[in-house]
Image (cartoon, rainbow, N blue to C red):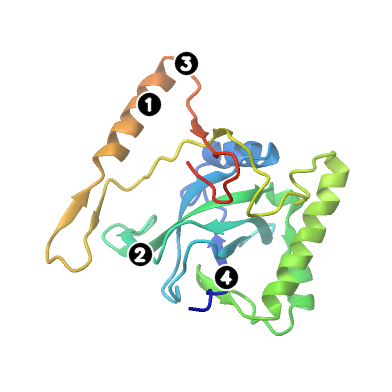
Amino acid sequence: MEARASRTFVVLWDGSDGGYDPDEFAEHVRLTAQGYTAPIRWSFGQGHDDPEPGDQIFLHKTGNRNGIIASGQILSSGVEFHPHWSEPGKMAPYITAEWEVLIDPSDRLPYDQMKSTLTDFKFPVQSSGRKVYSTSDQMLESMWKDHVGKLALRDGNPWLGGSVTRAGGRHSGPCALERHRVGSYDLTGFASTTAVKVESELVSRFADYLTALNHKVQGYRILPEGTTVHSS
């Protein structure tokens, strides 16, 4: 069977604290700048087109300071439906992913630059999880690599510059603690059945307890020697 080619998607963030906790955002920026990846669960809109592990994602911040501020890869197969992050009572599709590069919005790849270059890609992006078709996907990846490469030269940071390939080169070490904000989810195919994320609740309670004692709480990523898949 012919291997499935990876795809590229754009996910959205409106810049609000509700959409991305400020402390978590700052920690993810710090971790990716040190060469670590940051696990995240992100909303994926309705036209999700069956995302798979290894597909690439770009985070497009909307509103003020509009532009691309992150890149990474999807870790989950398909989507899971959870309560919407901003609309109580509404369910929405989510993916599990990890950022490989996340930068401050002041260093973004500007929206105007993308729009003028990616003329075959319809702007603005209206919902999270928009697929980027060829050859726009290659052009976007090239633009982003060039953009963060310039930031890397400015800051003297080779990790930010994307000199390490997506499949390898990352190393074991501290990473953001994966804390799911949703404690349960509906099981597809089972009527009126809800699964409870007991482990997630325990992790969050224990992390909160340690934080209250002024301990720094974080995860640790173990990447076995020779592997080409990120592990957490």
Question: Which residue type carries mark 1?
Answer: Asp
Left or right relative to 153: residue 34: left
Camera-side mark, 3 or 4: 4
Question: Which residue type carries mark 3?
Answer: Asn
Q: Which mark is residue 181?
A: none
Mark 1 and mark 2 lie on one chain; the one further toward the N terminus is 2
Q: Helix or strand or loop: what does disc 1 sit on?
A: helix
Question: Which residue type carries mark 2?
Answer: Ala
Mark 2 and mark 3 lie on one chain; the one further toward the N terminus is 2
Above/below status of 58 relative to 116:
above
Q: Which mark is residue 6?
A: 4
Task: Give residue 79's quadrant in the image.
Answer: bottom left
| Residue at left offset 78%, top offset 49% | 161
Residue tagged by mark 3? 214
Q: In 3D space, how far apart are the residues under numbered discs 1 and 2 (Cα atoms)?
A: 27 Å
Q: Position of residue 29 (x, y in %)?
A: 64, 41
Q: In 3D space, how far apart are the residues under numbered discs 3 and 4 (Cα atoms)?
A: 42 Å
Q: Are marks 2 and 4 in contact (CB under 8 Å)?
A: no
Residue tagged by mark 1? 208
| Residue that lies at the very extreme toward the top in this rendered image | 213
For mark 2, does the 10 Å Cα neighbourhood hold few (<14), some (14 to 19), or many (20 or more) residues?
A: some
Q: Helix or strand or loop: what does disc 2 sit on?
A: strand
